[in-house]
Amino acid sequence: MYKAKIYVTLKEGVLDPQGQAVRAGLISQGFAAVEEVRIGKFMEVVVATHSATEAQHLVREMCERLLANPVIEDYTFVLVEVV
Amino acid sequence: MYKAKIYVTLKEGVLDPQGQAVRAGLISQGFAAVEEVRIGKFMEVVVATHSATEAQHLVREMCERLLANPVIEDYTFVLVEVV
């Protein structure tokens, strides 16, 4: 089995209202040094495959079709073998 | 300036209904090999500090107070210097 750690981020240039809200919240709590906040998603997906190649194909397809929106988001992932 | 890449995950043993929903969605889309899904948060925060130590203290405090819920969540972060 393999565990994929998937990071989904907004593409550069895409507005991030959620990040702006978090930045405003941080500043209002006294964290004046905060310049920018971007919010992304982090997912851990365990897939029952025997080879890393198979896991990689599967996770890429999941990301393209369901876990990320390729129009406005980028994704990266790392695979770790789990026992 | 430093950019902190912050990963917030649910502690082990904490139920993750969002992850279960995503797992059910993936399986219904034909990804039968999916064993488990856990959903976390990923945030990028740029702080205007001159030293990495200062940035580290600041980001840790943000995580403890606002960005993560230490009762049910763990967090890790890495700092990258940006120009």
Image: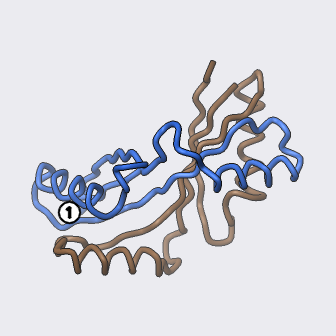
Chain colours: A blue, B brown
Relative side of B47 to B36, left or right: right
- What residue is drawn where x is 74% and y is 48%? A23
Report the residue at 68% width, 39% height from top.
A36
Q: Which of B33 and A34 lies nearest the eye of the viewer?
A: A34
**Residue designated by label 1:** A1
- Establish if B73 lies above or below B48: below
Quarter holding the N terminus of chain B is top right
Establish if B31 lies above or below B6. Answer: below
- SS assignment at label 1: loop
A74 displayed left or right of B82:
left
Q: How many marks?
A: 1
Q: Position of residue A66 (x, y in %)?
A: 31, 64
The answer to which of A2 and A41 lies nearer the viewer is A41
Quadrant hosting residue B27: bottom left
Q: Chain of mark 1?
A: A
* Rendered view: B36 above or below A63: below
Q: How busy is the neighbourhood of tag 1: few (under 14 within 10 Å), some, or many (20 plus)?
A: some
Of B7 and B57, the residue lying toward us: B7
Residue B34 at what x, y percent from top left?
A: 24, 71
Rendered residue at 23%/80% (across/down)? B28
> Where's the C terminus of chain B, which quadrant?
top right
- Give the farthest residue toward the top: B83
Query: What residue is drawn where x is 23% and y is 58%?
Result: A2
Task: Classify residue B45 by image quadrant.
Answer: top right
Label 1 sits on what residue type?
A: Met
In the image, residue A80 lies at what x, y percent?
A: 28, 51
Query: Could you tell whether A21 is left or right of A11 in the image?
Result: right
